[in-house]
Image (cartoon, grey):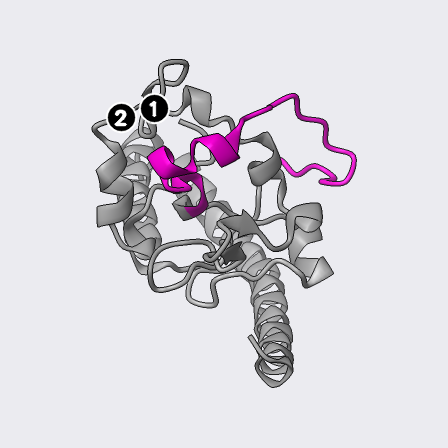
């Protein structure tokens, strides 16, 4: 990516972050309105005009339906939860990746996950504008920070916590037997799916 495109991406990212911050402000107003709604519900219940148990069941049913719809349409901004300082995060994962790439084909670099506030504020790790704040992928499904020529990470020192903590040995989508270097029959699914349909998991 040349300097001009990088600067343009930075400007777009800042603009989107402003939009998301304004959305958070609107959420505060929404909470205020919600408090009035709950107050009204309690008053109606006290007067015997509605059944709280029936209302709760209906509310849960509708909430579950809306959450699924929001997830499918990519509505809302997501961050890591919980968050950790990636520069002090300690991980004991030691994988001989260079000796396994011909088998796993860097499948871990196709997984999707939410970034932390630290990642986004830092401005080094690119995020998916269509699904804030998930790590960005190219059209081929690989992380945008993967050097396809050498199959290594171009932001290794600044990589997010999920990349630091991820242990492919425990991911049955990639390995059937890690020690024997037998890949999982599920591995092909990580390459058959598009970015938008990949599992949002940093561990199996």
Residue tagged 1: 175
Classify mark 1: helix, strand or loop.
strand
Residue 82 in percent (x, y) is at 62, 35
What whole-number distance in Å separates the C-alpha atoms at marks 2 and 1?
5 Å
Instruction: Point out which mark residue 35 bears.
Output: none
Above-or-below relation of 114 to 29: above
Q: Is residue 81 visible from the viewing direction of this image? A: no
Residue tagged 2: 184
Above-or-below relation of 166 to 11: above
Residue 48 in percent (x, y) is at 34, 35
Look at the image and say whether residue 91 sits in the magenta stretch.
yes
Give the side of residue 104 with respect to residue 35, left or right: left
**In the image, what residue occupies the spot 37% across and 58% down?**
74
Tell me where the magenta segment starts and ends, as one range. 82-109
**In the image, what residue occupies the spot 52% across and 48% down?**
114
Give the side of residue 175 with respect to residue 36, left or right: left
**In the image, what residue occupies the spot 71% across and 60% down?**
121
Classify mark 2: helix, strand or loop.
loop
Residue 7 in percent (x, y) is at 65, 81
Q: Earlier in the sequence, mark 2 or mark 1?
A: 1
Q: Is residue 190 visible from the viewing direction of this image? A: yes
Q: Contact (CB < 8 A) between labels 2 and 1?
A: yes
**In the image, what residue occupies the spot 46% across and 58% down?**
76
């Amino acid at each position: 990516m040349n300097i001009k495109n990088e600067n343009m991406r930075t400007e777009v990212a800042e603009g989107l972050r402003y939009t998301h911050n304004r959305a958070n402000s609107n959420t505060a107003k929404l909470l205020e309105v919600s408090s009035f709604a709950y107050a009204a519900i309690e008053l109606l219940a006290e007067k015997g005009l509605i059944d709280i148990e029936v209302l709760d069941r209906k509310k849960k049913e509708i909430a579950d339906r809306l959450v699924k719809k929001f997830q499918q349409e990519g509505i809302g901004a997501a961050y890591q939860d919980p968050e950790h300082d990636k520069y002090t995060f300690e991980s004991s994962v030691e994988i001989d990746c260079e000796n396994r790439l011909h088998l796993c084909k860097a499948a871990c670099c196709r997984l999707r996950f939410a970034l932390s506030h630290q990642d986004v504020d830092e401005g080094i790790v690119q995020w998916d504008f269509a699904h804030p704040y998930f790590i960005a992928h190219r059209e081929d499904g690989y992380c945008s920070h993967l050097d396809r020529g050498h199959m290594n990470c171009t932001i290794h020192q600044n990589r997010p916590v999920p990349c630091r903590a991820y242990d492919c040995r425990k991911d049955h989508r990639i390995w059937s037997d890690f020690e024997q270097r037998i890949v999982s029959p599920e591995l092909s699914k990580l390459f058959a799916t598009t970015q938008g349909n990949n599992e949002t998991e940093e561990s199996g």
